[in-house]
Amino acid sequence: MGEIVLDVQNVTKQHKNHRGIFHINLTLHKGDVFGLMGPNGAGKSTLFKILVGLIKADQGKIRFFGHSLDTAFEQAMKKVGCLIEKSVAYEHLSALQNLQLAARFYADIHPKDIEEALKTVGLYEVRKEKVSDFSAGMKQRIALANALISNPVFVILDEPITNLDLDGMIEVRNIIHHLSTEKGITFLISSHSANEMEKICNRVGVLFKGELLKIGDIDELTERQSLEEFYLNCVQTNGVKDHE
C-alpha cells in the first residue's frame, strides 16, 4: 500500500441548513489519484475546505503525513497544494506575474520554483503574455501552477476540469498523469465527469447527501460496468433507501 498520506477519521460537519458531511472515513496512500464523485450539494467542497483548514469540522480527526490538522497545522499542510472551487487569475497580469503574487503567501518560494511550475503546466513559453489572451484551458493551468509552486507531494483539486472544452480537459488530465507517474505526487480530485475520473484515477469514492457511500479501485469497479453506471447505481440505490 505504501505510505499513508491522508487519514480522515469520522469527520462530520453539519451546516445550518442541515446539509454537510457525516462520518467520513478515507485513507489515501502515496501515489493514489483518488476521485471523489457526487452531485452538487453532496459535500465535496465542504470536505475539501475542512482538509485545508478553511472551515473546521464538528468532529473527527484528520492527519496529513501523520501530522494532526488540529494540533500541528503547519506541519500537516507543509507538503499540500490545493485548488479549492474556482480559481480566478488576474487577467491584466501575465501568467508569471500571477504566480509571483501567489508566491508571496509562502515563506520560501524561489523564482526557480515558479519557473518549474510554469514548465510543468506547459505555460513557460507564454509566461509573459497577459492572461486575458489565454484560453479557458490555459487559465486552468495557471490555477494548477498555483497549487504546485510550493512543491507539494499531495494535491487537492476541486473540479479542475469544470467549464473546460475537450482540449482543456485533455491538457489537465495529461498534467495530472505526468505528475503522479513521474513525480509520485498524490492527488485528491473531485469532478462531475465519470468519464474523466475513469481515465485519470486509480481509486474513486461516491459522496451522496454528505455520506461516502462506497470506495473502490477503478479496475475492479469497471470490470462489468462503466464508472458512470457504477456511480448511478450507488446514487439511485441510496435514493430508493431514503424513500423507504
Image: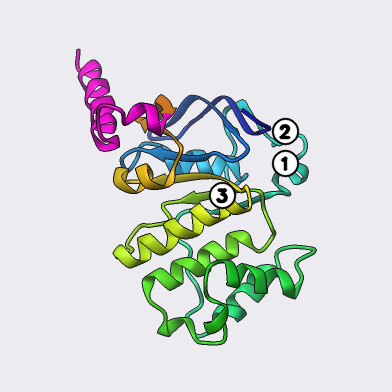
Instruction: Looking at the picture, tell me which residue is in the foreground, 159 or 199.
Output: 199
Badge nearest the viewer, 1 or 3: 3
- Going by the numbered disc 1, the residue's amino acid type is Ala
Give the label on residue 76, or none: 1
Magenta-highlighted residues? 217-244
Q: Secondary structure at mark 3?
A: helix
Mark sitting earlier along the chain (3/2)? 2
Q: Which residue is mark 2?
A: 68
At x 27%, y 28%, the residue is 235
Badge nearest the viewer, 3 or 2: 3
Picture coordinates of residue 119, whole percent (x, y)? 59, 72
Picture coordinates of residue 59, whole percent (x, y)? 59, 25
Magenta stretch containing residue 221, yes or no? yes
- Going by the numbered disc 2, the residue's amino acid type is Ser
Residue 42 in view of the camera: yes
> Please, what is the dominant secondary structure of the magenta stretch?
helix
Q: Secondary structure at mark 1?
A: helix
Picture coordinates of residue 226, whole percent (x, y)? 26, 35
The quadrant of the picture occupied by the C terminus is top left
Distance between the alpha carbons at the discs numbered 3 and 2: 27 Å
Mark sitting earlier along the chain (2/1)? 2
